[in-house]
Amino acid sequence: MSTAVADSSATTSMATSSGASSKSSNNCGELESAIDSSGGVATTTTISSKQQQQTVQKEEQQQQPKCAIHYLASFHEICVVTALLPLVTLFTCFVTAYVFQYDDVHETHCRVYNIVPSISAITGVSPQRYFWRFSIALHIGPRIPIAFVYKNYYRSQLARLAPALVPRTSCLITLILLLNCIEIAALGGVTYISNRENYPVHERIFITFMICSLCYMLATIKLNATLNAGQQLNAKQQLSIKWKKILFVASILSTIGLLIFFAKHRFYCHDLAFSWFAFFEYLIAIANMLFHFTIIWDFPSQYMLIIQGPRENLKQFIGASKPKAN
């Protein structure tokens, strides 16, 4: 009797334990199912949230105005045209005035024999006057942004210098920009105020042009020597620096000759003195044009852009495309 009760108790205990185990097993299965289900919902929710974010970002990008390029031109070609324009025009004015208006362009206050007219003479008669002024107007337009391109180009190379040299070199860059702008303004002055209209003003502006031109050449050569000290230059850079020095020396020698023969013509009225003065004047003008023409070796593969877009986008675009120090 007791044994049966014990067995029954044991059976009941086992049955209870088995039932509990079964319930526990069922609970674990339900928990795992819940976890799996919960995880699936979370994953689905996460994916859905990412898709919504991507959709919103795409809509914002579509609504936000983008940068548009309206003009793209080779900086090399612009510089070539800018430098050659006054040279070709000067040659054309000289030939046409010498052939068709010989007496007008050789008239001087001394009334002595001359064979070479001055630049002021050949560009002061009609219709050469209008042709020359139109050419200089086209020439001056690109030269102003080119002056600031040079300034930024030089400033981008300051990082290669020792810290002690940076302030002085930075001042030299500013001086070069100032001299270049004054030279451009003086060129416009001597072009549009002819010696026949107002000789005293024309003469003073021409002197300003000469001084600023020579100082600009010298300062540019000095700056290149400072920036390129200890640097390995390529063939185009070496050619540019070489010709800058040659043209500066030619300008100095021509200026000395111009001053000598100007004095002989102005105070002594020697025969052919004005012709020699005019000859050296042409040399100075050509040397100045060719000095600026060396820009084709300084910027051989750059481009000029005109872009439109929000200021924030332009800042990012310009910041990514700023010139870096070599």
Image (cartoon, rainbow, N blue to C red):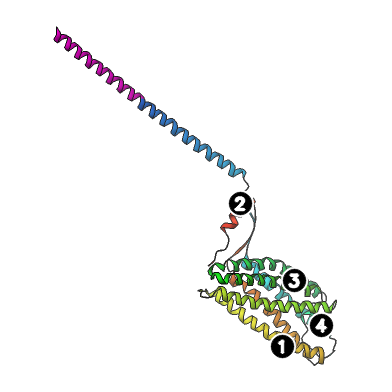
Instruction: Looking at the image, tell me whether mark 2 or mark 1 is earlier in sequence order.
Output: 1
User: Measured along the vertical axis of the image, is residue 65 above or below residue 132?
Assistant: above
Residue position marked by numbered label 1 in the rendering: 257
Circle 4: element type: helix
Tell me residue 133's x, y (percent). Answer: 78, 71
Nearer the observer, 88 or 147 = 147
Q: CA distance from mark 4 to mark 2?
A: 56 Å
Q: Residues within 10 Å of mark 1 (few under 14, many from 20)?
A: some
Dot 2 and dot 3 residues touching (CB under 8 Å)? no
Residue position marked by numbered label 2 in the rendering: 313
Q: CA distance from mark 1 to mark 4?
A: 21 Å
Circle 2: element type: helix
Dot 1 and dot 4 residues touching (CB under 8 Å)? no
Tell me residue 78's x, y (percent). Answer: 65, 67
Q: Which mark is residue 185?
A: 3
* Residue numbers of the magenta segment: 1-30
Residue position marked by numbered label 4 in the rendering: 105
Q: CA distance from mark 1 to mark 3?
A: 25 Å
Instruction: Looking at the image, tell me whether mark 2 or mark 3 is earlier in sequence order.
Output: 3
Q: Quarter of the image containing the N terminus?
A: top left
Q: Residues within 10 Å of mark 3 (few under 14, many from 20)?
A: some
Amino acid marked by disc 3: Ala
Q: Is residue 157 visible?
A: no
User: Measured along the vertical axis of the image, is residue 64 above or below residue 172?
Assistant: above
Q: Residues within 10 Å of mark 2 (few under 14, many from 20)?
A: some
Q: Residues within 10 Å of mark 4 (few under 14, many from 20)?
A: many
Residue visible at 63% across and 68% down?
Answer: 151
Quarter-of-image position of residue 136: bottom right
